[in-house]
Image (cartoon, grey):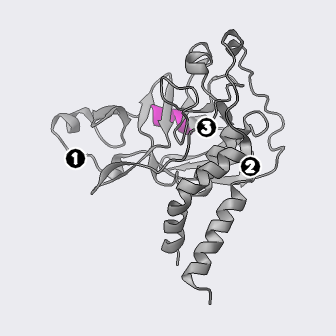
Amino acid sequence: MKSKLENVGLALLALFVSAQINATEVQIRTNLGNFNVNLFDTRTPVTVDNFLAYANAGAYAQTIVHRSEPGFVIQSGGFVFSDTAGFEEIPTGNAIANEPELSNVRGTIAMAKLPSDENSATSQWFINLDDNSANLDVQNGGFTVFGQVIGEGMDVVDAIASLPRFSTGSFSALPLRDYTASDASNNVTITRENMVIIEDIVIVNDAQVTNPDITPVANTRIDQLPTTPDTGSSGGAVWYLLAPLFMLAVRRALKRL
């Protein structure tokens, strides 16, 4: 029988290996339904590796959709919620280099970042509900699109976007399930059952040529902006991220023992 230490070591080894997978299709599993996303590995390798490092470490499991702007975006990848502790930020690694190669059209997934730093994306991501290219393709150095929702996945995304939104704590547009304006005015406590939860993000196809019929829209507006020096590489981004995510992987491994 393997010791706990051996099992943890194997879990960490699996994390290192899986983070290198050139996955092109992942499934985002939510409590409102699942949807698949085709990742653009060759066009945005740093961002895809970054996203997969978080996904493979389990960092996205049980995160919430913390922002919904109908006709614009829904956003996740930054916070978890419990009835006892409330909102908590997830552990994040180093920020990554911006890769504004593709356009923020409806159905694409892109990285969120700080408003004053184009190379500040870590874990948070958003899905474009409309064609936001005129704004997001050039704002703050352009927002990096790294994948596209496929099949009927936008039905799930649109259902999330149609939920009522509320202001609570530091969140001004939090989508909630089974919660009404009357509940808010009567100070009914918000619970985890009201949250839109990303239960997990998992690889469903790691072939490099998955969905070859998809042709991402190029970001041509970014040509209007000054170029920015490349500050990272695909492999480097992964290794920098793995160190801060070790403890998360260890905790998940120990829970399975």
Q: Is residue 157 magenta?
A: yes
> Nearer the observer, disc 1 or disc 2?
2
Residue 87 drawn at (x, y percent): 33, 47
Looking at the rendered structure, which numbered label has been put on residue 96?
3
Residue drawn at x 73%, y 39% is 45
Q: Earlier in the sequence, mark 3 or mark 2?
A: 2
Q: Disc 3 and disc 2: Cα gap in Å?
A: 19 Å
| Pointer 1 residue | 189
Residue 20 counted in the magenta span: no
Q: Which quadrant of the rendered structure holds the N terminus?
A: bottom right
Residue 8 in which image quadrant: bottom right
Q: Is residue 149 left or right of residue 196?
A: right
Look at discs 1 and 3 and give the one toward the viewer. 3
Stretch in magenta:
156-161
Quarter of image, res 83: bottom left
Amino acid on which disc 3 is placed: Ile
Secondary structure under tag 3 reads: loop
Q: Secondary structure at mark 2?
A: loop
